[in-house]
Amino acid sequence: MTLGDPGGPVRLEPLLSPRRVLVQLALGVVAALLVVGVVGTLAARQLAEREAVNDAATIAGVLAESVVVPSLTDALVAGDPAAIAAFDELARTRLLSDSIVRVKLWSDQGKVLYADEEQLIGRSFPLSKDQRSALAQPATVADVTDLTQSENVFESGERLVEVYRPVWTPSRQPVLFEIYASYDPVGERTTQLWRGFAGVTASSLVLFVVIVSPIVWHLVRRLRRAEEQRIDLLQRAVDASSDERRRIAASLHDGPVQELAATSFTVAGASATAGAHGQRALARDLDAAAAAVRSSIRSLRTLLVDIYPASLARSGVVTALHDLAQTTRRDDLVVRVDAADEDDLAMSPDAQRLVHRVAQECLRNAARHAGPATVTVSLHRDGPGSVILDVVDDGAGFDVEQLRTAPHEGHLGLQLLADAASVPGALLQVSSAPGHGTHWRLVLDGELGAAT
């Protein structure tokens, strides 16, 4: 079973760099320009289409009043060829142009009375909803058409601006006047609008960057200095904590531990004297007191190693493991250490502290739960980029599956191990079963396990 997170926690971000922030700001401006360009193009096209539709509607109204209505006759509505020919000449000279590409006249029944495309004259098509609306409620209707209707079989191009407007003959017969305007001005107007919009937007963003960049640079430098000061304060706090732990450990070692050791010798001597004088009960009490004092000394020495493993900083992890084994041994627990030479391991300080921490917790668990057992601590390098720590005991063991179902119930030591191994490059695994002992394995890979 694997404990902890093999991937480790998220790495800390590096200190803020003013140059990096400005590059990100510039990239943000470029992205904003791209977005604004796309949105601006769409908006400009819609606005240009609306302008083209309005212009075409205005032109249709002017042409209807000034050209079509005065020339519209009942004979044209009746289909008289001469009237159609006369209106055709008028349409080609005064209506059709570079911007007006098609002219039609419709009856209210959907018959084409006139078209500059002769093949359409006399044909009937179903009137569209817009055409019927323009006739029923006299109004000018204009919009962009995609030329998909059957009546548009002779129109070329992809899109045109279509305008409908009702007109009346002298006898008040309704006729629908229709023109198709070119879509080309829409593209030209779109370009003009987009250039103006893009110019204002781009210059505004550039001006914004010019104004904001010095402020951002100043703020980022201040933030960077604050981060550096915070890191320095944290390092000082860690160093001060380490110094304090070292002073406490030295005070305990030079004071209470030495005094208890002297007391142990004194009580042992008094016990021997009492035994020599036949005071067996007193001798037994003194022996018990001496044993209690020695137990306290062992506990204090274990505490000293926990507070400040001096051998780890002074002599390396191998010596520190031997010290751990010495302080953990007791009558029913044998601890053996099998480790490579310190020079062969060549571990970084971080890796040494992690190995010591995990070995310490594993030995504590063995001392508390393994019962009478033999524990073997092995530390070896497996290749240039991997270090393996094995802590194996032949004690009582436990059911690993319980950790899957209830990982936090009654397993504080295991949780501590999992937390300790939750660093990048570390993998902690455990194998155990009731009555078959326990095997812990810590694998350090990558930068953490690389030789230094």
Image (tube, rainbow, N blue to C red):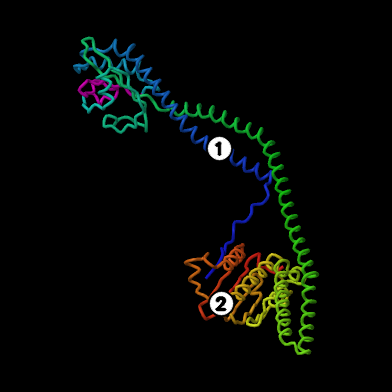
Please tell me the numbered disc located at residue 263.
Answer: none
Compared across the picture, whether 216 is left or right of 431 comes to right
Mark 2 to mark 1 CA distance (whole Å)? 60 Å
Q: Is residue 271 above or below residue 5?
A: below
Asked which quadrant contains residue 422, the reply is: bottom right
Instruction: Tell me the element at label 1.
Output: helix
The amino acid beneath tag 1 is Ala
Residue in front for this viewpoint, 229 or 188: 229
Compared across the picture, whether 111 is left or right of 43 comes to left
Compared across the picture, whether 43 is left or right of 23 comes to left
Asked which quadrant contains residue 297, the reply is: bottom right
Asked which quadrant contains residue 411, the reply is: bottom right
Disc 1: which residue: 32
Was residue 106 drawn as part of the magenta stretch in this picture? yes
Q: Position of residue 2 (x, y in %)?
A: 54, 69
For the residues labelled 2 and 1, say whether their Cβ atoms are less than 8 Å apart: no
Was residue 375 drawn as part of the magenta stretch in this picture? no
Q: Which stretch did the figure color magenta? A: 101-121
Residue in front for this viewpoint, 270 or 410: 270
Q: Is residue 306 above or below residue 375?
A: above
Q: At x 57% / y 75%, what residue is drawn?
A: 369
Please tell me the numbered disc located at residue 438.
Answer: 2
The amino acid beneath tag 2 is Thr
Would you call the spot at circle 2 few (<14 residues within 10 Å), some (14-19), or many (20 or more)? Answer: many
Q: At x 50% / y 74%, what residue is drawn?
A: 399
- In the image, which is nearer the foreground, mark 2 or mark 1? 2
